[in-house]
């Protein structure tokens, strides 16, 4: 029966499903730069990969958050009028597979794009967009003939592997693993030799020449497959030189001492995932997600802050600190991603202060902290207050170091306190009972100095506090 | 040895360990308490000592402040409530988009006019931010306390008098004086008579300018004294200007006569003969400069007297829109030395004659309701754009349907152009958001989104804020 026989139904459908600006899969196909993008997008055009899907009331804008390979999800947005788009992933392809996936979801109406207020991150992108004409590449970027939607949707046939090949591959992997371990142990020998040299030559000249000296040993560690440790040593000068000059010898002893401890820990248990993560490499997202021992926590989380740092090795680290508002589970979670600086500035994934219910998978650890966002439920307003600190500040400062002496950043939830300055202008946090005074690394001005801090979330690093956020009589505040 | 004593012994020795390593010497001899951990190899012993010392310093030692700590007082609550939490992201984004402090000030004036203040985490005035609304005086004083080394002193909320003058911080004092002047002009002047002399020149200038509110003949003697005796030329000039507004200009001198010589009083019309003051165009650039300099030193009463008319007759007989430089100079003269009634008369005159750009110069001296009225008239009759209308209207206007003015049609046409860019018309859309009433903002939003602008378009932020914010402000 022709569709025209159902004029009433069509009218009703129109009224409840006003697509605003409709697109079809052909547009997605045309927009894709190549067949592999289209194939990847087909894999992402599944509701389970997405959260926070929405669209503007006028149907012109759509957005969503897509779980990528990193710890943080990607924020994806598109303007359906001209197919202008933006994704926070580091891909150099434009548009990336996430944008194509979002458009695919929309074109096929796989999920409802519920009309909602435009999130500020979408408005911010709109404000930054230059000329609509620049965002009209549909069909121009690559000829549609190169790509095939049906081929993209087709599942790859499962190949059955010969058991001999599998055994051979496993043996090769084990051999590679042994070689890697030997290379790391050699590199750690070189590192300890180097640390000993710094003591023998004197910490004073070490501090004066810290950047060059660290660069040299970091390069040796990269060759020795201790890439994470190399990155840490590359960042050592930055941490050391951020200290007041008089505090640098102490800072150098702490930093170098941690390196010795970490090297010894690796030698003792080279297969320990946690120590390997601090020296060589981290597990992949898939490894953590499929690890039955990995702690999973479904809780309400508050985004404390996002720290983006360009490292000396050309990578940008993006760290999102989350506070667990529930009474159980790790108090903090850290979502950590790296991407090349050459990929350009990435948009923020979260807005400080936003709260969401979500499931996190923690990397296995004695003190679970680093995590991956597994699932994020629809943002819900929760009026839950920040929890009471789980332990006294003095314990919170030391307990993690007793378990893992080499760690650098310790997140803390501090009790009621206040910011003060000394005569030299240095900033301090003091607890309301006066029992504890801690130096603050970050600049503090305005409201942060002019109110009682009911609770303070901070990072203790290099014997100084970096304040992430605080609860006050004025509500939640963050550093400027 | 107890554990505590042991830690103390380590702490006492760790300084020597650091000193030795700083100089490149072996440090194990200075740490006998860990001797059992060192082993036999000296190089290995140094590494073990390093690991132990590093852990000890990280775990057991925190820096202590070397001096007494200074805590700032609480940021005080203001007389108006903070913007609702749900609208703070919008305020923050608007603030972030406006790099120019003047533009941020427009927003905080708008908020104050609607009965709200910003959250201190989103915006706070600097101590010297004289343009901030008076409601922020307590925060300006807090900023001054923060920037100085003075210990905080108790803020008073008493009525300002000469006796409690010192109990007020400067911004709160100025706000209290302004309030006193509105309520009891003589009392405010009496306080100033007693205390002005002790203030710095900048402070004297700011405080004296408050007398422009409810200026009357009662102020003449005081102003006369300042104009004659103050140490600072700029304070003298302000007193002279205020006196001139009261018709007590310095009197006709040679300069004013020379200025009058650039103009001629003529009659025109056959039946209804009326007088008109026409400019005689200066013949050389030097003469143009001379005329400008003479205007700068003149006052309205003396100038009109030199032409043989009263100030009101001068404004009525002025031949507007012929010599724009003369128009501008006269408007400046009126703004600085004219009475309130003359300012309104001049604004009416130039508004009728389509010289609305000049109303902007008079706007600061017009009452808020007058500013809104002139902005509306200029928008409807003379087709000015919204940015200019906002300069005339200030922060307290509540125009019901700004987009129906010609500027609205122009704006919509510009937004609909094929080559329109997402960054176009930012200032115009912002200005509409500032001058519209709440209902006007809602209507404008509907109109603009109906015309194709996205609901999430950040250019609509100011309109969105206006539309969402309860209007609790005093209506002009």
Image (tube, rainbow, N blue to C red):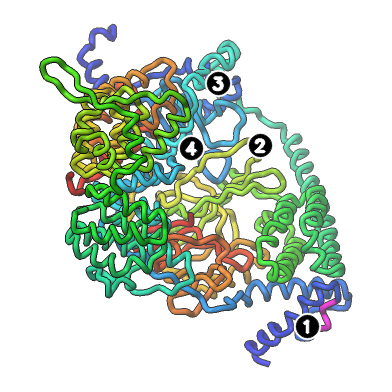
Question: Disc 1: which chain?
Answer: B
The vertical placement of A185 against A49, above or below, is below
Please name whichever residue, A287 or B475, is drawn nearer the observer in this view of the structure: B475
**Cβ atoms under marks 1 and 4 closer than 8 Å:** no
| Element under disc 2 | helix
User: For the residues carrying marks 3 and 1, which lies nearer the camera in this image?
Assistant: 1
- State the residue at coordinates (61%, 49%): A309
Image coordinates of residue A297 in percent, x first then y, are: 47, 54
Q: Which residue is mark 4?
A: A75
Distance from the alpha carbon under mark 2 to that under mark 1 = 49 Å
Q: Which residue is mark 3?
A: A32
| Element under disc 3 | loop
User: Of callouts 4 and 3, which one flags the residue occurring earlier in the amino acid sequence?
Assistant: 3
Image coordinates of residue A404 in percent, x first then y, are: 64, 66
Q: Which residue is mark 2?
A: A342
Determine the residue located farthest toward the right in the rendered image.
B41
- State the residue at coordinates (37%, 74%): B153
Q: Which quadrant of the figure contains the N terminus of chain A?
A: top left
Distance from the alpha carbon under mark 4 to that under mark 2 = 19 Å
A367 in the magenta segment: no
| Element under disc 4 | strand
Task: Please give the range of residues in magenta.
Answer: B26-30
Question: Disc 4: which chain?
Answer: A
Please name whichever residue, B69 or B213, is drawn nearer the observer in this view of the structure: B213
Same chain, labels 3 and 1: no
- State the residue at coordinates (67%, 54%): A277
User: For the residues carrying marks 2 and 3, which lies nearer the camera in this image?
Assistant: 2
**Cβ atoms under marks 2 and 1 closer than 8 Å:** no
Q: Which mark is residue B31?
A: 1
Distance from the alpha carbon under mark 3 to that under mark 1 = 67 Å
């Amino acid at each position: 029966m022709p569709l025209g026989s159902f004029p009433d139904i069509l009218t009703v459908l129109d009224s409840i499903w006003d697509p605003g600006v409709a697109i079809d899969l052909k547009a997605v196909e045309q927009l894709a730069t190549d067949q592999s993008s289209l194939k990847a997008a087909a894999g992402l055009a599944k509701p389970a990969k997405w959260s926070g899907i929405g669209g503007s009331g006028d149907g012109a804008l759509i957005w969503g958050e897509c779980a990528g390979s990193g710890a943080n999800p990607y924020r994806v947005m598109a303007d359906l009028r001209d197919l202008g788009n933006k994704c926070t992933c580091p891909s150099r392809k434009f548009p990336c597979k996430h944008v194509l996936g979002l458009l695919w979801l929309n074109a096929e109406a796989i999920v409802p794009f519920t009309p909602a207020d435009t999130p500020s991150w979408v408005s911010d992108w709109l404000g930054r967009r230059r000329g609509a004409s620049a965002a009209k590449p549909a069909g121009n970027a690559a000829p549609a003939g190169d790509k095939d939607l049906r081929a993209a949707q087709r599942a790859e046939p499962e190949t059955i592997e010969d058991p001999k090949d599998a055994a051979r591959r496993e043996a090769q992997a084990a051999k590679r693993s042994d070689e890697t371990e030997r290379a790391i142990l050699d590199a750690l020998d070189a590192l300890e030799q180097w640390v000993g040299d710094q003591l023998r030559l004197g910490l004073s000249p070490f501090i004066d020449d810290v950047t060059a000296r660290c660069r040299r040993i970091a390069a040796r560690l990269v060759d020795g497959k201790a890439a994470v440790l190399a990155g840490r040593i590359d960042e050592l000068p930055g941490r050391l030189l951020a200290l007041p000059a008089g505090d640098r010898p102490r800072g150098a002893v702490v930093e170098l001492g941690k390196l010795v401890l970490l090297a010894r820990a690796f030698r003792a248990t080279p297969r320990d995932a946690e120590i390997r993560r601090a020296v060589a490499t981290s597990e992949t997202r898939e490894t953590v997600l499929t690890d039955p021992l990995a702690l999973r926590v479904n809780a309400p989380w508050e985004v404390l802050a996002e720290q983006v740092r360009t490292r000396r090795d050309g990578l940008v680290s993006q760290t999102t600190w989350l506070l667990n508002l529930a009474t159980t589970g790790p108090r903090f979670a850290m979502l950590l991603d790296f991407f090349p600086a050459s990929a350009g500035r990435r948009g923020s994934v979260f807005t400080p202060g936003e709260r969401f219910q979500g499931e996190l998978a923690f990397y296995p650890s004695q003190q679970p902290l680093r995590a991956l966002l597994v699932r994020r439920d629809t943002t819900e307003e929760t009026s839950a207050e920040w929890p009471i600190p789980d332990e006294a500040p003095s314990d919170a400062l030391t307990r993690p170091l007793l378990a893992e002496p080499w760690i650098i950043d310790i997140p803390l939830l501090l009790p009621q306190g206040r910011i003060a300055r000394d005569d030299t202008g240095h900033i301090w946090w003091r607890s309301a009972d006066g029992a504890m005074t801690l130096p603050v690394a970050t600049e503090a001005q305005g409201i942060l100095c002019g109110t009682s801090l009911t609770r303070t979330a901070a990072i203790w690093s290099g014997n100084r506090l970096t304040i992430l956020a605080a609860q006050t009589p004025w509500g939640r505040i963050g550093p400027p | 040895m107890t554990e505590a004593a042991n830690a103390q012994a380590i702490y006492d020795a760790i300084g020597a360990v650091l000193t030795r390593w700083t100089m490149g010497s072996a440090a194990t001899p200075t740490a006998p308490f860990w001797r059992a951990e060192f082993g036999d190899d000296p190089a290995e012993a140094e590494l073990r000592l390093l690991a132990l010392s590093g852990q000890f310093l990280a775990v057991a030692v925190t820096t202590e402040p070397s001096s007494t700590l200074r805590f700032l007082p609480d940021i005080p609550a203001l007389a108006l409530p903070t913007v609702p939490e749900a609208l703070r992201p919008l305020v923050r984004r608007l603030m972030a988009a406006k790099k120019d402090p003047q533009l941020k000030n427009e927003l905080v004036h708008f908020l104050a006019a609607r009965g709200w203040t910003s959250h201190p985490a989103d915006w706070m005035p600097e101590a010297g931010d004289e343009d901030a609304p008076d409601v922020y005086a307590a925060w300006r004083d807090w900023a001054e306390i923060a920037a100085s080394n003075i210990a905080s002193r108790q803020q008073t909320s008493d009525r300002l008098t000469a006796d409690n003058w010192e109990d007020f911080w400067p911004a709160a004092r100025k706000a209290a004086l302004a309030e006193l002047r509105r309520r009891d002009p003589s009392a405010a002047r009496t306080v100033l008579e007693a205390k002005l002399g002790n203030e710095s020149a900048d402070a004297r200038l700011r405080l004296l300018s408050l007398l422009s509110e409810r200026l009357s003949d009662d102020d003449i003697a005081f102003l006369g004294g300042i104009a004659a005796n103050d140490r600072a030329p700029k304070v003298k000039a302000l007193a002279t200007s205020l006196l001139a507004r009261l018709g007590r200009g310095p009197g006709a001198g040679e300069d004013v006569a020379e200025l009058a010589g650039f103009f001629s009083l003529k009659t025109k019309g056959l039946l209804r003969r009326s007088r008109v003051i026409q400019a005689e165009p200066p013949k050389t650039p030097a003469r143009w400069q001379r005329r400008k300099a003479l205007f700068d030193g003149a006052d309205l009463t003396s100038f009109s007297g030199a032409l043989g008319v009263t100030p009101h007759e001068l404004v009525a007989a002025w031949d507007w829109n012929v010599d724009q430089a003369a128009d501008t100079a006269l408007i400046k003269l009126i703004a600085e030395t004219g009475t309130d009634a003359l300012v309104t008369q001049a604004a009416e005159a130039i508004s009728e004659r389509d010289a609305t750009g000049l109303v902007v110069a008079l706007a600061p001296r017009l009452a808020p309701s007058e500013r809104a009225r002139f902005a509306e008239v200029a928008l409807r009759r003379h087709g000015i754009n919204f940015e200019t209308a906002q300069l005339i209207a200030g922060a307290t206007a509540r125009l019901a349907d700004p987009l129906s003015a010609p500027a609205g049609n122009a704006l919509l046409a510009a937004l609909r152009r094929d080559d329109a860019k997402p960054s176009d018309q930012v200032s115009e859309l912002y200005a509409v958001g500032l001058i519209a009433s709440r209902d006007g903002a809602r209507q404008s939003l509907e109109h603009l989104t109906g015309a194709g602008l996205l609901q999430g378009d950040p250019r609509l932020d100011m309109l969105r804020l206006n539309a969402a914010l309860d209007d609790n402000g005093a209506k002009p």
